[in-house]
Amino acid sequence: MAVDNQTVVYISEQIVILISCALSFLGSLLIIFTYIIWPDLRTTPRTLLVYLSVADLLSAGSYAYGVWSVFESNSVDCVVQGAISTFANTSSFFWTVAIAIYLYILIVKSNQRQADSFVLCFHVISWGIPLGITVAALALGRIGFDASEVSVGWCWVRIQAPDHVLWMLLTGKIWEFLAYLTLPVLYVLIKKHIHRAHAALSEYRPILACSPLSQSLSNMADRKLTLIPIIFIALRIWSTVRFLLMLADSPARQNPVLVTLHGIGNTFQGAANCIMFVLFTQPIRSRLSTMLCCCSCRGRSGASLIPSNTPNHSGLGLDVETPSQPEDTLNTSSRGWPDGC
């Protein structure tokens, strides 16, 4: 495919995608930040989410540099940016599926020891395979300028390489396709298990199971488990569409709307994770709101305002939820796991 067939990236597209990159970067930082400052909330599922956020952080940063630069040749910074984004994006796919597998074993199989034993394997696979693929692609000179045919200004697989389709599959697309298939199946199985457990609870404890609090928590968990694969597919499908259009040599792949959706979908994952993490995780939401409130009060009065019935934790005035509270034990975080795990 000739380079003169390059897809044009307009300034308006750059601005929108750079904003998406910034939101994803900040969202990933927030997830990592809350993990660092609140040690009592460092469950294994949230630790896995932090690893996913590290991959999304690298993706957002490398994509932002590529969108800002809009490369036009196989320059050194193009190759470096392409290598980082290839590694981080592929790693993000693996960590996303790894979290789903962990939840399936933890919730459906009810075996936390077995789930925890997979964490080391997750590290080897989710960091090792992307790193191996990226190093191989670099050694063979396959990372570089792709004329924005399956990107939005950033570098990926050299479009002039004779086997560029194979390397596009190896460095991302094949793992993306597998995630499309794996995530819905795992989360549907988890949802069915939760529904069966709730039905059994209704049979033996009808008053408790039918209480407004129980119904609310069940509905919230159900919504989260539904949204996780839907949001992933909704964000990633545009890059898949452009890839298929490239294989068909269709000019529709250069449509500005499709290009913009592709850019947002590839760069917004970290922000989407953060939004779900904050909105659907009561302890995190409560502590962040308390922190913001205290910061606002300090800004107005110049003094720390801590309620007399709230314990002081490092001067932040954060109230710590105990495991006995239903919100802490039954809520689920951005990837759908119970907060009490």
Image (cartoon, rainbow, N blue to C red):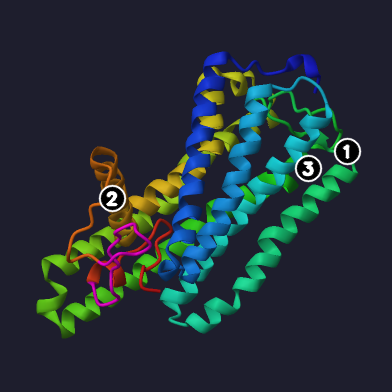
Which disc number belongs to residue 167? 3
Q: Position of residue 247 (x, y in %)?
A: 70, 31
Look at 61% across and 31% down and name the residue there.
Answer: 64
Kind of residue indicated by mark 1? Gly
Look at 74% across and 16% down and name the residue there.
Answer: 5
Quadrant position of the N terminus in the picture: top right
How many numbered marks appear?
3
| Sequence-wise first label, 2 or 1 | 1
Instruction: Provide the residue designation for mark 2.
Output: 289
Which disc number belongs to residue 41? none
Single out the residue that lies furthest toward the right.
140
Left or right of 1? Residue 62 is left
Q: Position of residue 33 (x, y in %)?
A: 48, 53
Q: Give the number of the mark in front: 2 or 1.
A: 2
Using the image as rendered, state which of residue 37 and residue 159 is in the foreground.
37
For mark 2, give the secondary structure: helix
Q: Position of residue 210 (x, y in %)?
A: 12, 71
Residue span colored magenta: 311-325
Using the image as rendered, state which of residue 56 and residue 256 is in the foreground.
56
Left or right of 99? Residue 71 is right
Mark 3 → mark 2, Cα distance in angstroms: 45 Å
